[in-house]
Image: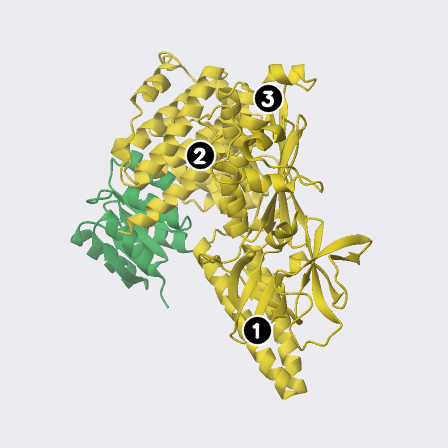
Chain colours: A green, B yellow
Amino acid sequence: MGQTVLVCDDAIFMRTMIADILSQAGYEVVGEAETGVQAVERYRQLKPDLVTMDIVMPDMSGIEAVRAICLEDPDARILMCSAMGQQALVVEAIQAGAKDFIVKPFQPSRVLEAVQRLLG
Amino acid sequence: MDADKYVSLFVSESREHLEQCTAQLLEWERSPTAVEPRDALFRSIHTIKGMSATLGFGRLTQLLHATEHLLARLRDEGRAATSGIIDLCFRAVDVAERGVALAASGEDDRLDAVVLLTELESVLGPEPVETSRPLAAAAAASDGRPIRVQLRPGVAMPAARAAIVLRCAASLGEVLAIDPTPDEWLRESFDGAFTFNLRSEATGNHLRRVLLSAGDVAEVRVEGDVVQRPRGKRQVKVDMDRLDRLVRLTGEIVVARGRIATIADGLGDVGLEAAGHEMSRLIGELQAAVLSARMAPVAEVYERFARPVRDLSRQLGKSVRLDLDGGEIELDRAILDELSEPLLHLLRNAIDHGIENPTDRTAAGKPAEGVITVSAHRERNTVVITVKDDGRGVDEEAVRARTGWSAPRDGSSGLLEVIAKPGFSTARAVTDVSGRGVGIDAVVHWTRSRGGTTELGTRWGVGTTVTLRLPLAVAIIPALLVGVTDHRFAVPLGFVAETVRLPTERQLAGIAFRGDRVPILETLGPRRGRDGDQRTWRPGVVIDVGGRLAALAVDTLLGQEDIVVGPVDAPRGTPAWINGATILADGRPVLILDPAVLIQGEAP
C-alpha cells in the first residue's frame, strides 16, 4: 500500500500539480487542505505519512500550521513548499518543526527526491 | 479547529515550564553568576512564547518576548544578574502565569503588563551597538566535538538547508558555537560552509550518516569519536483520562473475576479453578501495572513549594529554610495532583504561625533561621507525608482559654479536632496569609475524602508536626470484609493488624494484644452479639492507625477481597466512620470503614 500524503496549498493549481507528481510516483494522496487551519484539522484526522505545506495560506500560515501540527506530533513529516525569496520563512518553518523544503517552481524530480528522503 | 485541545495543551505545558522557570530562578538567585539557570529559564520562556504566539495570545507573547530578550541580552553581553533583575524575572513569571490563565479563558487582551514590560525593556539600559561575536564563540569552542559541514555548491536556500542540518545534529546532542551564526546564513555571502560543536555520545559514522540525511550536504567532517552509550528509557506522555479509563476497566475486570470465582467455587471443577487462579494472577499483574502507570513521585509537588515559601517568609520578615525529603516516593497521580494545596496550607500555617521571627528565635535560644521539613515515606499500603516545623508550636494555653479544651493524657491528638473546627484560629491578628481558620480543617477534610488520615503533634516552644497518611493507590484496594447483623463492611487491609477473638462472657473494656492493652470498639454492634448468639467469643479486627490500636467487634469475618474505591459524596447523617461504598463481586453493596475515625471516636 502506498504511503499517504496530505497536500496543503491555497491554490487548486498547486495542489493538483503536487498531487499528480506524487500519485504518479505511487504515493496515495489522502487529503487536501487550503488553509492552515484545515491542514491542522486534516492532519489530525488522516495522520498521513507526509504533509506538503505551502507557507502563505489564509487564516493560518503554513508555518503556524507546522507549529501546531508538531505540537501534537513532533515526528510529523512536513515538507515546506516555498518560493524564491522566502528563505527566512523557510528557516522559521524548519525551526518550527518542518523536516524539509522544496522551492517553487517545482521540478518533479526535486519534489520526489525530497519526499523519498523524508519517507526513507 | 479543535482550539480547546491546543489551549489545554498550551496551558498544561506552559504551567510545567513556568514551574521550571521558578525552580531555575530560585537556583539563579542562589548563584547569580551561574549560566545554566539563566539559559534554562531562557529556553522555557522561549518555548512558552512559541506556543503562545502560535495560539495568537499577543499580550502574553509580548511579555514573554521581553523577558526572553532580557535574558538573551544578559547572555550576549556577559552580564551577571542582580537581585533586581532576578526579582523582575520572578514578577514576569508570575504575570506570565496569570497571562496563561487569562489566555486559556480567551481573555488574553485583559493581561495588563505595561509597567512590567517597560521595566523589562529598560532595566539593562540601551542595547550596545552590534559588535562582532567571535569572542563568545571562541569561549565555547572547547566544548563538544568540532564538526564541519559543506553544502552542495549552488544549493537553493542554503540557510534553510543548513537549518535542517542543524536540526539533525540537535537530534543527537547539544549544538554549540555555530560559525558563522544562523543569522549570518541569510546573507548573500553564505557559501554553505559552516562549523559547530556537538556535545553527543554518537559515533562519528552515525553522526555523519544523520547529517548527510539532511540532504544537499556535500561533506561532513567530524573530529574525535566516542563510544556510543546505551540510550535512556523511552517515555511517552499519556493523557490522564486514558489512564483513568484503564483503571476503571481493570477495576471492572477485577469485579467480574470475583463473580466468576464465586461461581467456580460452587462448581468444584478443578480445571476451571486452575484456569481461574491463572486468570487471577494475570489480572493481579495487570492491575499492578495499570496502577503503577498512574504513580508519580512526590518530587513533582515539592517543586511547587520553594517559591511560595520564599515569598511568604520574605513578606513576613522571617528566615525559613525548606527541607524536602523522600521526593522519590510515588503516589497515585490523582492524589498527587491535589496534594499541593493541602500541603501549601500547612506550609503557610507553619511559616505564619509556627516559625517565629528571627529576633524571637534568637531570644529563645534557637537558630535565627527556622526549618520546615516536608518528608514522605512508605508505610505498608500508605504514603505518610509530614510537615514539620521547629517553630513555637500550638499554644495549648490559648486553645484552652478559647474552647475549654483540655489535652487528653495519651497524647495531643484531641487537639487536632479542636483546631480543625471551621472558624477556629488562635492567630493574634488575622493576616492575609492564614489565621482565618480555614487551613487545617480543609486539610483534614481533604485527607479524609481521599481515604487518609491527619494527625497533629505539637510541643509549645519546640514545633509542630502534621502527618498525612494517604492510600498509595486510590483505585483498587485490598480489604477485609466483615459482617455485622445484615450489613457488610470493608476494612482497608492497610489498617488491619490482625484478627482476634473477643470473649463475650465478661465485661471487658479492652484486650491484651502484643503486650498492650487495646480498647474494644463496639461502634458497629455490641460485642455480646444478639439474643440467641450462643458463642463465647466474637471475632474482632485489630486496626492499626499510625501505631494506635483498637479491636473492632464484628459478627463474622467474610474474607479478603479487592474493592474498587471511588470518591463518594456521603449523604447527610452518614456516620463519619463510613468512608465510602463499593459494589462487591457478587453485586452486593458494602460500606467502607474509616479506621482512623473509628479510633478517634474511641479517644477519651
Residue occupying image coordinates x 46% and y 62%: B245
From the viewer's perspective, is residue B127 above or below residue B71? above
Q: CA distance from mark 1 to mark 3?
A: 55 Å
Q: Chain of mark 2?
A: B
Q: Where does residue B153 sit, x and y in percent of width and height? A: 38, 37
Which element type, helix, strand or loop, lies under badge 1?
loop
Which element type, helix, strand or loop, lies under badge 2?
helix
How dense is the environment of label 1, judged by Cα within 10 Å: few (below 14), some, or many (20 and up)? few
From the viewer's perspective, is residue B503 above or below residue B215? below
Of circles 3 and 2, the one toward us is: 3
Badge number at residue B104: none
Q: Chain of mark 1?
A: B
The image quarter containing residue B101 is top left
Q: Nearer the viewer, residue B40 or B317?
A: B317
Which one is earlier in the sequence, the residue at label 1 or at label 3?
3
Badge number at residue B18: 2
Q: Label 3 sits on what residue type? A: Glu
Which one is earlier in the sequence, the residue at label 2 or at label 1?
2
Q: CA distance from mark 2 to mark 1?
A: 55 Å
Q: Where does residue B579 sit, x and y in percent of width and height? A: 54, 57
Asked whether disc 2 touches disc 1, contact meaning CB atoms under 8 Å apart, the reply is no
Q: Which residue is mark 1?
A: B486
Which one is earlier in the sequence, the residue at label 3 or at label 2?
2
